[in-house]
Image (cartoon, rainbow, N blue to C red):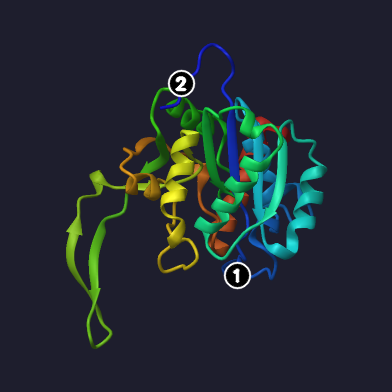
């Protein structure tokens, strides 16, 4: 388990931003979509990176990008003067493989092998408005001894279990008690060694969407780790559809009106 003394924690992060964003319909990678049209400082990549960079103790950040957008992502981040060491690398065919590429890049960054990170975050640029204070809570839980931590929200909808019939009709076959359910968000946090071990153990599954893990906490469970839950945030919604984008734009406007433009990043 991660342990620290009185010094500031050493935290690393992988930000996955290699998604195509096809469901948003902009014809550009999702991470380049702007919440305020015409303002590149409000694209999902920039918003997510700036909030991650403000995490207490963050020392190194690797962003995974579509292979043909590495230089574009690098130019955008270079203009931010982030207060951490950072690097953009090409993502891969699955999210799991992209995170693995990010971890490999972190391990190869100058100085990384010379010391031990106390915690590692894996975040999705699609959750660009996830607040830094929530991220800090995830890190704090890891530093208290939890090897795997996820932020999550209680489920408010009634959830039914369904099955598709040979005719194509979909019918209800059961119900699930929603009090035991949580909607998982990112960033997810891990002890550094735990995250490396989880990815190493599941590396043979990473190359195919049918087998790859959809989140990193699942791989931690596969190696026997207990996954702990901390409160998530409504602001950490996943921006996937035009409706999500509209909601995120409204949230950004609300943030700017209540705390000032600088707080929105």
- Asked whether the beta carbons under mark 1 and mark 2 sit within 8 Å of each other, the answer is no
SS label for mark 2:
loop
Q: Is residue 20 above or below residue 55?
A: below
Q: Nearer the viewer, residue 260 or 43?
A: 43
Numbered circle sitting on residue 42: none
**Residue for point 50% across, 49% down:** 237
**Residue 21 drawn at (x, y percent):** 61, 65
Say whether residue 176 is visible. yes
Residue 28 lies in quadrant: bottom right
**Residue 192 drawn at (x, y percent):** 50, 35
The residue at which mark 2 appears reads as 3
The CA span between labels 1 and 2 is 42 Å
Q: Is residue 219 left or right of residue 236?
A: left
**Residue for point 38% across, 44% down:** 220
**Residue 174 drawn at (x, y percent):** 16, 63
Check the picture and name the quadrant holding the N terminus. Answer: top left
N-terminal-most mark, 1 or 2: 2
Nearer the viewer's eye, disc 1 or disc 2?
Answer: 2
Residue 13 lies in quadrant: top right
**Mark 1 Cα shell of 10 Å, populated few (<14), some (14-19), many (≥20):** few
SS label for mark 1:
helix
Say whether residue 155 is visible. no
Q: Nearer the viewer, residue 205 or 45?
A: 205
Q: Residue furthest bottom?
A: 167
Q: Is residue 146 left or right of residue 265?
A: left
Q: Residue furthest front?
A: 114
**Residue for point 76% across, 45% down:** 77
The residue at which mark 1 appears reads as 22
**Residue 256 drawn at (x, y percent):** 67, 38
Q: Is residue 226 above or below residue 23?
A: above
**Residue for point 63% across, 70% down:** 25
Check the picture and name the quadrant holding the C terminus. Answer: top right
């Amino acid at each position: 388990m991660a342990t620290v003394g009185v010094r500031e924690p050493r935290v690393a992060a992988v930000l996955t931003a290699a998604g195509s964003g096809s469901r948003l319909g902009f014809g550009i990678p999702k991470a380049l979509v702007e919440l305020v049209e015409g303002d590149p400082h409000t694209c999902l990549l920039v918003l997510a990176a700036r909030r991650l960079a403000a995490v207490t103790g963050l020392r190194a950040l690797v962003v995974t990008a579509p292979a043909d957008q590495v230089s574009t992502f690098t130019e955008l981040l270079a203009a931010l003067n982030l207060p951490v060491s950072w690097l953009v690398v090409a993502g891969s065919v699955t999210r799991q493989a992209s995170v693995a590429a990010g971890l490999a890049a972190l391990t190869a960054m100058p100085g990384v092998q010379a010391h031990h990170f106390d915690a590692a975050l894996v975040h999705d640029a699609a959750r660009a408005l996830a607040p830094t204070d929530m991220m800090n809570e995830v890190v704090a839980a890891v530093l208290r001894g939890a090897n795997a931590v996820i932020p999550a929200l209680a489920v408010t909808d009634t959830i039914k279990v369904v099955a598709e019939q040979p005719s194509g009709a979909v019918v209800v076959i059961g119900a699930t008690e929603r009090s035991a359910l949580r909607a998982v968000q990112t960033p997810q946090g891990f002890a550094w060694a735990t995250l490396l071990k989880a990815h190493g153990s599941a590396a043979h599954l990473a190359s195919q969407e049918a087998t790859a893990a959809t989140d990193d906490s699942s791989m931690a469970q596969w190696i026997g780790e207990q996954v702990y839950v901390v409160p998530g945030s409504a602001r950490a919604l996943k921006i996937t559809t035009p409706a999500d984008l509209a909601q995120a734009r409204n949230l950004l406007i609300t943030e700017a009106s209540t705390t000032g433009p600088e707080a929105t990043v």
